[in-house]
Image (tube, helix red, strand yellow):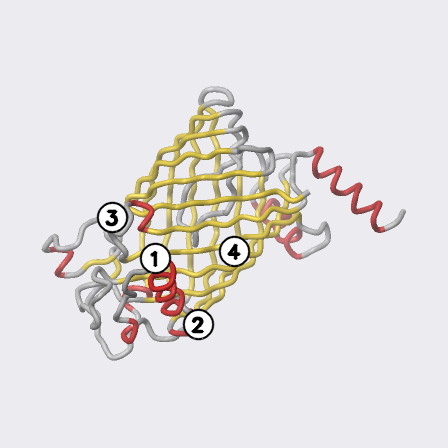
Amino acid sequence: MTARAALSGLLLTLAAAGVSAQTLSVQVDNDEFAGLNKHDRWYSQSLRGHWFRPALADGPVARMADAWCGLQACDAGATRTARWSIGQTLFMQNQRRLPAHDPEDRPMAGWLFASAAALIESRDQTRLAELQVGVTGPASLAEWVQTRWHRDVLRVEPALGWDHQLRPRLGVQWQLAHEQRWPLLGQHLDVVGRAGGTLGTLQGQALVALSLRLGDRLSGTAMPLEASAATGRLDTGGRWSVQAGGAVRAVGWDRFIDGPLYGAVSRARPAPWVAEAHLGATLAPTPAWRLRFALVRRTMEFDSEAVAQGRFKPQTFGTLQASVDLR
């Protein structure tokens, strides 16, 4: 058998099983999605791209997945998937034209990272183990991206204050997550739950989430989450779905909030508990293409005197995702 014939046979086998050989996915989070020119603060923007491919049978991802399933039984027929991604996140203070740092506000910061992940996926369950490695500070290119986006695309004055952004730091983050689906009304109504945590040099936190979904031939565990935590999957089974739910995070540390700055001191500290609610819709105009938009309302991620006085209010941001299967 030639290599070409073997590859064709593999693609046909994967297609028959309902699994794409490869999937590309892009997620963009932005507070401007909640109202143009209304905000531009705190969790301001995140852009992340994913590449999914089936794990090699004798590769490290498959071996890790098999070991995980040995510790905790996996669903029968669960697939092993390798995911590679790159992303960038921007954090802003409340007033983007303020040249100095407001010590009661969260600092301006950027996070540029790459990650490798192993996923175990079935109709009713997803497990994720991910390693993220990246940098903060000027090397994150946050100032460069934000300035050119505002000045050259939006034609508005760029943000000031980058001279006092978070100092350079190497970030290494390890994330584990388990998502489970519980059908309520056949293939048209279900609940998806998620439990997981992140541990690393920049953040230490645990998260639990629930999402109620209504849709066409529901399957999988896809739910709206911010780009750094989401699995990147969009497939909910059929042509459409709508979902609503929420999440709660217990935060041990967050160096994006209380890390050292250039020439400034911040009195903001991570909030120990952060809650959010989401409302979204997913469409699959073709079997290969999927789109999702969701709005997320989040409580304050930091504590300070200004927060206690009510000067800062909870944030709303939008998340837009698109994915395509490559067969």
Q: Are marks 3 and 1 in contact (CB under 8 Å)?
A: no
- Mark 2 element type: strand
Q: CA distance from mark 4 to mark 3?
A: 26 Å
- Residue placed farthest to the right in the image? 1
- Mark 4 element type: strand
Which of the two marks, 4 or 1, is nearer to us in this view?
1
Disc 1 residue type (three-letter): Leu
Disc 2 residue type (three-letter): Leu
Which of the two marks, 4 or 3, is nearer to us in this view?
3
Is 141 situated above or below 319? below
Q: Earlier in the sequence, mark 2 or mark 4?
A: 4
Residue at the (44%, 23%) spot, across then down: 184
Q: Is residue 58 left or right of residue 222?
A: right
- Mark 3 element type: loop
Is 43 situated above or below 79? below
Circle 2 sits on which residue? 170
Q: Earlier in the sequence, mark 2 or mark 1?
A: 1
Where, by quadrant of the figure, is residue 293 drawn? top left
Circle 3 sits on which residue? 299
Q: Earlier in the sequence, mark 4 or mark 1?
A: 4
Disc 3 residue type (three-letter): Thr
Q: CA distance from mark 3 to mark 1?
A: 28 Å
Task: Give 177 or 219, whichever is nearer the viewer.
Answer: 219
Which of the two marks, 2 or 1, is nearer to us in this view?
1
Q: CA distance from mark 2 to mark 4?
A: 17 Å
Q: Are marks 3 and 2 in contact (CB under 8 Å)?
A: no
Residue 130 picture location, percent across and down: 52, 55
Circle 4 sits on which residue? 130
Q: Earlier in the sequence, mark 3 or mark 2?
A: 2
Circle 1 sits on which residue? 154
